[in-house]
Amino acid sequence: MNDMRIVEREVETKAVKISARNCQVYYGETHAIKDVNIDIEDKTVTAFIGPSGCGKSTFLRCLNRMNDTIDVARVEGEILLDGEDIYDPKVDPVQLRAKVGMVFQKPNPFPKTIYDNVAYGPRIHGLAGNKADLDVIVEKSLRRGAIWDEVKDRLDAPGTGLSGGQQQRLCIARAVATEPEVLLMDEPCSALDPIATAQVEELIDELREQYSVVIVTHSMQQAARVSQKTAFFHLGNLVEFGETGQIFTNPQDPRTESYITGRIG
Amino acid sequence: MPVLWIVLIVLALGGVGYMLGRRRAMASADGDVRHLHSLPTYYGSNVALLTIAPALLFMGLWLLMQPILIERQIIGLIPESAIAEGSSRSLVMSDVRRVAEGLDTAVAQGAMTPDQADSIRTEFTDVRERLGRVGVALGSNVRPEVLRAAQHYRGLQARYSAIMTVLVLAVAVVGFGYSYLQTTKDFRARNVVETGIKSLLILASTIAILTTVGIILSMLFETRNFFSQYSWTNFFFGTTWSPSFSGRGGASQLGILPLLWGTLYISVVALLVAVPIGLFAAIYMSEYAGPKMRAIAKPLIEILAGIPTIVYGLFALITVGPMLRDYFAQPLGLGESSASVMTAGVVMGIMLIPFVSSLSDDIINAVPQSMRDGSLGLGATKSETIRQVVIPAALPGVVGAILLAASRAIGETMIVVLGAGAAARISLNPFEAMTTVTVKIVSQLTGDTDFASPETLVAFALGLTLFVITLGLNVLALYIVRKYREQYE
């Protein structure tokens, strides 16, 4: 098991990509995220773990302002991407989301062809000058999504016709096609079987070379397998944040220990 | 006995059956519900159901059959000589019915005793005058054969009603007795009641379906009569519509093409108005409007759907028509008429807006939020998301909504009568008066009609053609919706 070796994992300090300072989120009257401070590093996989309803997905959605689509949600505090406040009125959430891509819990390919699914982002942002460029981007993205070999002969087939695991890798390919700097993943494997999960996890590990990846997961094994840093959320608080190896073997907070040993959650 | 009384008696019997069935079931289980197979109400319902349903069904069938049976017996009583020149047996029959009803009224008002009604003779009494006194106006003097047939008619009616009363009550009592005796604690009352309820539901849907079949059949028969008098090639490919009215001589030209052209032209104009406005309104409502705005605006749009079409017709006649004529048709030199394809099309389009918008709104709302999130998460703007993801995903449903709106436009009559006029014509000028299939159906069937002439029967051929077209559109709409539905499920 990978879990056994996590202590030996090499850890190096990298540049901070996203940092949150005193971040609060309210859903109407509910105080969903309380005073979260966190520094997410570049070229690192950061896992958010915690029991259901602890706010980890909510916080994730703050990082690319997806909470803007929810009327009652309100965000306070600072979230800096490369030192710039993403909630500054000058920032266009549309441009921000091009830089901070997102993969959702349930695979959500558009009812279009596989090709058009991947080409969607590049087309919107005008990343390709011509059809040939676009072909290159689509192939590269599908390769990076580790699904190229399975779909290269049927790029014109509808994306919704793929299996669940393939759909999710298609969605990842679609997200990387816009060349984001950060990739947010909200429980990307919860709808997948173990084999598809393994493929996606392998993919996440490869993506780390170029992106900062933030993954929300319910599976502590998954967090331990894929991440270098782990943040534990509980009841809207960021309880503990540190090296994955340290969180799983030597948690500082009693709540973290209770959760990873299965006593709460 | 009047039908209402029979129904009440049967229902009362059912009510009593419910109480007794329940009580008997409880008694058979020594008062302990747990020993029963079903809950006590099921035993009661079983008795009530078996008492009421067969009796009322039987009565319904009987009431359907009774006039046919009576008529068959009476019709033999009318001698060939009683049928005047240019008349027919069925006309005499309706005289008979009318006199019989007159006698009923006279008896009911006390102007005649029942005995008198049965025994009066035209030879001794002026029946027309006596019936006129109680408010029954007859067109001509009553002939003795007709009076006798009418008296016989009344006699038969009374006899059949009495037989029916007895039989219906007997059916109810037998149903009651049978189900009451069935009731023991091991009887599976719940299963029987469930089956019974299912059968009633099936019966209801069967009646709906049979009605449709009946409508189609009646149209088919009349259409066949029409085509036996008028050649189908002239009907389907004729480009002139000029019916000559019966008696005035000259052959009619009954070509459907000018009418179909008018129908399609007006429908296309209506859809050109309704689809963009309706669709954009739906997009605004479902994607942009806040909950408050939505709560106010949606019902307001739907009020449009509640306006009777005749009111739209008035609007077309006095407002839109003259306006289009004064500001468009005359300055552009396209026509002088306020009744035009444009007028009817625009007003009909307004009528269809709520139809398109509320169906499209539902369909757009049914597109999963995850699609929108996916697109927004890639950095698409709201309008890009709507254009490239939401609308394509909702497209099959929207197309279905549009086709349904189209079949309504094709069937619309009132707005066309008042807005587009009644001149059958094939022309490209949208400011000219034209007319549609439905309007011509109405005008062919209004006034004195002779159901043997092709001028009248053509209405059925027109109706059937229209029916086939709208049916085709509906089937196409359903096919499209079904075929693409699974795309985002």
Image: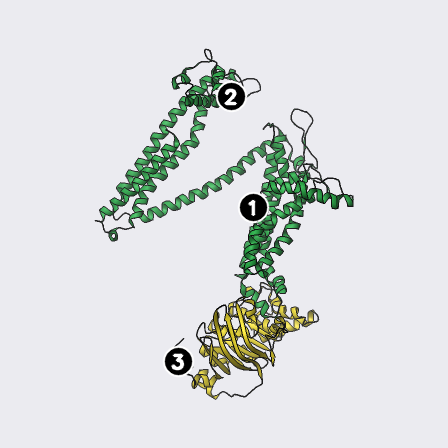
Chain colours: A yellow, B green
> Do the residues marked 3 and 2 share a common chain?
no
- Quarter of the figure that contains the C terminus of chain A: bottom left
- Quarter of the figure that contains the N terminus of chain A: bottom left
Residue at disc 1, secondary structure: helix
Label 3 belongs to which residue?
A: A258
Left or right: where does residue A205 sit relative to residue B171? right
Which amino acid type corresponds to the residue marked 3 in the rendered image? Ser
Which amino acid type corresponds to the residue marked 1 in the rendered image? Gly
x 57%, y 48%: residue:
B303
Q: Residue B305: x and y, percent?
A: 57, 47
Quarter where residue B397 is shown: bottom right
Residue at disc 3, secondary structure: helix
Label 3 marks a residue whose chain is: A
* Above or below: residue A193 compared with residue B200: below
Q: Given this view, does label 3 or label 2 mark the residue nearer the observer?
A: 2
Label 1 belongs to which residue?
A: B306
Label 2 belongs to which residue?
A: B137
